[in-house]
Amino acid sequence: MERYPADMTDFMEMFPTEDACLEYLSIVRWPEGYVCLRCGSSKHWKKARGLFACCDCAYEASVTVGTLFQDTHKPLRFWFQAIWYVVNQKNGVSALGLQKALGFGSYHTAWEWLHKLRRAMVRPGRDKLSGLVEVDETFIGGVRSGKRGRGAEGKSLIFIAAEEAPQGIGRIRLTTLDNATGETLVKAVQETIATGSQVRSDGWDGYNGLPRYGYTHIPIVHKDAVSGDATPLVHRVAALLKRWMLGTHQGAISHEHLAYYLDEFTFRFNRRTSRSRGKLFYRLIEGALQTNPVPAKSLIHNM
């Protein structure tokens, strides 16, 4: 059974101590009870500070081992406060905003924490999009001289897939692309959209090979579209993405980190109708427990 805070008061009551945070992590990570990470036995005894000892092989493991929280030097209560703050900011959080809100002594610490949390926003094995899915590409980056269109130079190429839903746009997927060749685009479709789905695109011939891979391809040239726009759902997502990047991050996003910002936007967009900030908190805690440790030295500081 999922249990998460209803509001800030509930949050403070649920997590008054470090032990309360450890207990919550163990419940989320092992809802059916602890299972030994070495031998798989469920026989164990619980020790202090979130440690579990296996009765069969005597292996000891912490609830944080192998997760985003492993080897953290900060109290889990601080992490929980950061996650609560992040999910309660509807339009996202900048490193400077998190630093001010939680009183980080260093901007770099806030920056690192946000990048670690972004890695937890993509659930391993998440379902692919299905039904009627619209696809197209867009560019992220400042205005520069040079080649325009799908081969534009000096910008990052982004693949966007958006499900058509009765209310407009359903779920989305975003990913960076090296180029807009048929091979690259088909691979992006296969990684984000379930086989058997209908895929609607503009007139770009890079998507023409989709039927060979089990998709129904619906190409529409812009001039033939009723509204004059062959992929209106994708273009709406692209506009919202660019507005979010400029509004929340002032456009200061490097190519090296772009994929993780796309994950955050996707996480927020796909849960935009959720009325419970507490459930978003639960999902991000769940994601953090499924995310491998991210050493600070592995993060590239390009700010």
Image (cartoon, helix red, strand yellow):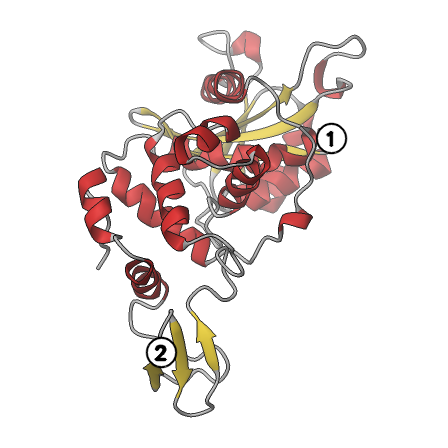
Q: Percent from the top left, x then y, of residue 186?
A: 64, 39
Say whether residue 138 is left or right of residue 62: right
**Which quadrant, please, contains the C terminus?**
top right
Please, which residue is most extreme toward the front here? 105
Q: Residue 85 got which mark? A: none
Residue occupying the point 68% across, 33% down: 177
**SS label for mark 2:** loop
Which circle's residue, 2 or 1, is located before the other in the chain? 2
Q: Percent from the top left, x then y, of residue 175?
A: 59, 35
As measured in the structure, the alpha-carbon distance from the residue carrying label 2 to the one carrying label 1 is 53 Å
Task: Kindly tell me whether residue 9 is visible in this rendering.
Answer: yes
Question: Label 1 neighbourhood size at 10 Å, few (<14), some (14-19), many (20+)?
Answer: some
Residue occupying the point 53% across, 10% down: 224
| Amino acid type of the residue tagged 1 in the rendering | Asn
Task: Kindly tell me whether residue 209 is visible in this rendering.
Answer: no
Residue 155 vs 280, above or below: the answer is above
Residue 143 vs 19, above or below: the answer is above
Q: Percent from the top left, x then y, of residue 206?
A: 68, 29
User: In the rendered image, which quarter is residue 130 located in?
Assistant: top left
Say whether residue 206 is left or right of residue 239: right
Question: Label 2 neighbourhood size at 10 Å, few (<14), some (14-19), many (20+)?
Answer: few
**SS label for mark 1:** loop
Residue occupying the point 43% across, 37% down: 267
- The residue indicated by pointer 2 is 47
Which one is in front, 38 or 163? 38
Say whether residue 88 is left or right of residue 124: left
Residue occupying the point 70% across, 37% down: 184
- The residue indicated by pointer 1 is 179
What number of labels is visible?
2
| Amino acid type of the residue tagged 2 in the rendering | Lys
